[in-house]
Amino acid sequence: MKHPLQQAEYAQSVADDTQMPPPGPPEIAFAGRSNSGKSSAINALAQRRRLAFASRTPGRTQQINYFRLRSGALVADLPGYGYAAVPRALKRHWEAFLGRYVETRQSLVGLVLIVDARHGLASSDTALLDGYLASGRPALILATKIDKLSASHRQSAAEDIAKAVAAAFPAHVAQVAVVPFSATHRIGIEPVEETLGAWLTPYAAEDAGSRIAAERPKEKAPRSRGVPRGPKRPSQG
Ligand code: GDP
């Protein structure tokens, strides 16, 4: 699956649990602190200027924006967290929502976590991973704004994030990959597309399989979803 986010279209916005689309198509979620560069990363992958847009008052008008990919898969742009000026009750509401979402969303096949490479992994990022990784599903961390670091610090910034993940989640190291990334300089686009494509490919194959089965009504369509493949590790080697 080449350029999985290209031609992504806005689908819907969701303000709370009751409005969530019923789990069906495979879903990839993008999460990150406010101002981490999440909207820019989505736009860079979609090759669109303003598919995802940052709120002018971060944290105030929080919602999940859903985008539909060519393949029918969904991208969930989750509300940015960690913005200091957000009222405490609202902060708690969205933290609880994010926790529930990454732990229980059935159709979620992979989590893309956006981390500012200059700041590294924050405790709020670790909290989100903590809820998510127990499910065994893969995560890809984009160490973004890497263009702001000198060439000699780019690789080490991504490695520091990988080390922080390994220290916090020694049992889940194989589920997490870190990619040096820049939306503005289009660094890391290809390995990210490769990983997202690999996450979605088993489901695309299943769709094709059930279509063939549907043409032969006497045979039962295969039911098993299979286990999503783990991310590749483009930052290594
Ligand atoms: P969001 O709040 O996480 O959606 O963050 P945005 O995508 O709106 O980005 C926050 C700020 O960081 C904006 O001023 C962006 O222009 C800037 N930014 C985002 N990604 C990059 C990047 O890869 N390189 C540089 N230099 N700036 C970036």
Image (spheres, rainbow, N blue to C red):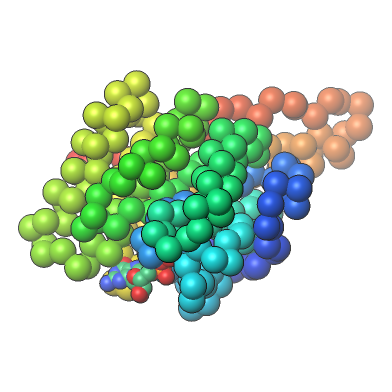
Q: What residue occupies the far top of the structure in this picture?
A: 171
Q: Kindly tell me whether residue 98 is visible in this rendering.
A: no
Query: On the picture, is 70 further left or further right than 171?
Result: right
Q: Is residue 148 left or right of residue 196?
A: left
Residue at image point 74% right, 26% down: 223
Displayed-image quarter of ligand 1? bottom left
* Residue toward you, 198 or 58: 58
Q: Residue furthest left?
A: 152
Q: In terms of image quadrants, where is residue 96?
A: top right
Q: Quadrant of the C terminus?
A: top left
Q: Residue at x 64, y 51 (%)?
A: 73
Residue positioned 54% across, 39% down in the render: 99
Counting from the top left corner in percent of width and height, residue 147 is at: 22, 67
Q: Position of residue 180 (x, y in %)?
A: 26, 54
Q: Measuring from the top left, give residue 55's x and y in whole percent.
A: 51, 72
Q: Residue furthest front?
A: 88
Relative to 39, residue 113 above or below? above
Work out whether 77 lies above or below 125. below
How many callouts does the rendering have? 0
Residue 215 visible in the snapshot: yes
> Of 12 and 17, which appears nearest the observer?
17
Q: Would residue 49 be found to the left or right of residue 207 on screen? A: left
Q: Residue at x 56, y 33 (%)?
A: 103
